[in-house]
Image: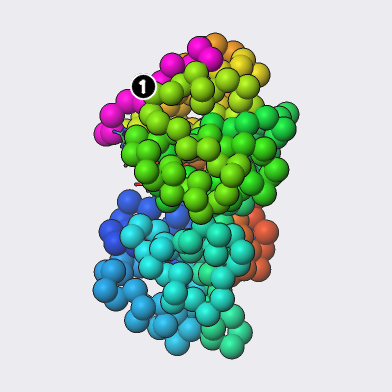
Amino acid sequence: MILTGKAKLAGVMGWPVSHSRSPRLHGFWLERHRIDGAYLPLAVRPEDLSTALRALPKLGFRGCNLTIPHKEAAVPLCDRLTSAAERVGAVNTLVVEEDGTLSGDNSDVFGFSENLKQGAPSWTRGRPACLLGAGGAARALIVALLEEGVPEIRVVNRTLSRAESLAAAFGPKVKPLAWGEWSAALSDCGLLVNATSLGMTGQPALDIELSGLPQDAVVNDIVYSPLETALLAAARARGNPVVDGLGMLLQQARPGFAAWFGVEPQVTEELRTFVLEG
Ligand code: NAP
């Protein structure tokens, strides 16, 4: 570890923040590239977010990541937003510019697309996609899928009104469907993505009938704990190509690291293993 008086500083703000894997992930890259810098966990209460963000330039920070519960609250606190952050309505990567102003980005959009491109290069964008969930992560996935040119996004959510709100926000390519309408949701799909918390360690199982899903459809679970979720195992067993969610977590970290520390980092098998072991 190199840490001099000129060290470049960044971190992750959340409440709580102790669960975050980001310090380990960025720490790996800092070490790998022999960078004089540090990436710190920053435990910031919701009521202190504005003060903490405004203090970043004064403390010499180059920026930070934002995690639960700060992603949406940070939007009005930024001086400018990328189109991804504006469309998602949430900021997870913040850069302190030379003049001390704050630029907000949402790199989950990039992370999701990049993970799919690497994990399933043959993914057919010309067919509908089925998206399970309508929470914060689902919004970023919709922006990414629309940017990729997917013709229809079927959003299946337990609370139908939340899926309907997404359709109202993102336009006619987004079709809301009630939970359990599996045959309508999956037929002709080129991609199925789980963006609910179901299947995550400690959460209820994701109970879905896959029989209507074309066998060449890519199945992606953005839940990465466990790495091989029951959904991915079931899809793999019936021959569908599968992509796990860890890659999204790693890929979304790249734009922030490049902006703060001046090096384009890579996602490698070694990094995957290192982050999983943490
Ligand atoms: P969120 O905003 O809280 O949304 C949770 C979603 O799960 C909602 O659609 C919710 O449906 C659904 N859900 C929860 N319990 C359910 C149940 N019992 N039955 C059916 N649906 C249920 O969470 P989020 O931020 O979108 O995150 C969702 C998941 O993605 C989490 O597991 C998170 O760890 C993961 N994630 C991964 C990455 C990555 O980099 N790989 C990035 C972001 C998030 P209702 O609307 O009906 O409540």
User: In this view of the protein, which residue sits in the foreground, 193 or 107?
Assistant: 193
Residue 220: % across, % down: 54, 31
Residue 264: % across, % down: 67, 59
Q: Quadrant of the C terminus?
A: top left
| Element assignment for label 1 | loop
Can residue 29 be seen from the camera position used here?
A: no
What coloring was used for the rendering?
rainbow
Residue 75: % across, % down: 46, 69
- Which segment did they paint magenta? 202-212
Can residue 198 be seen from the camera position used here?
A: yes
User: Which residue lies under the disc numbered 1?
Assistant: 207
Residue 159 in the figure: left or right of residue 263: left
- Say if the magenta span includes residue 91: no
Label count reads: 1
Residue 77 in the figure: left or right of residue 84: left
The kind of secondary structure the magenta stretch mainly shows is: loop
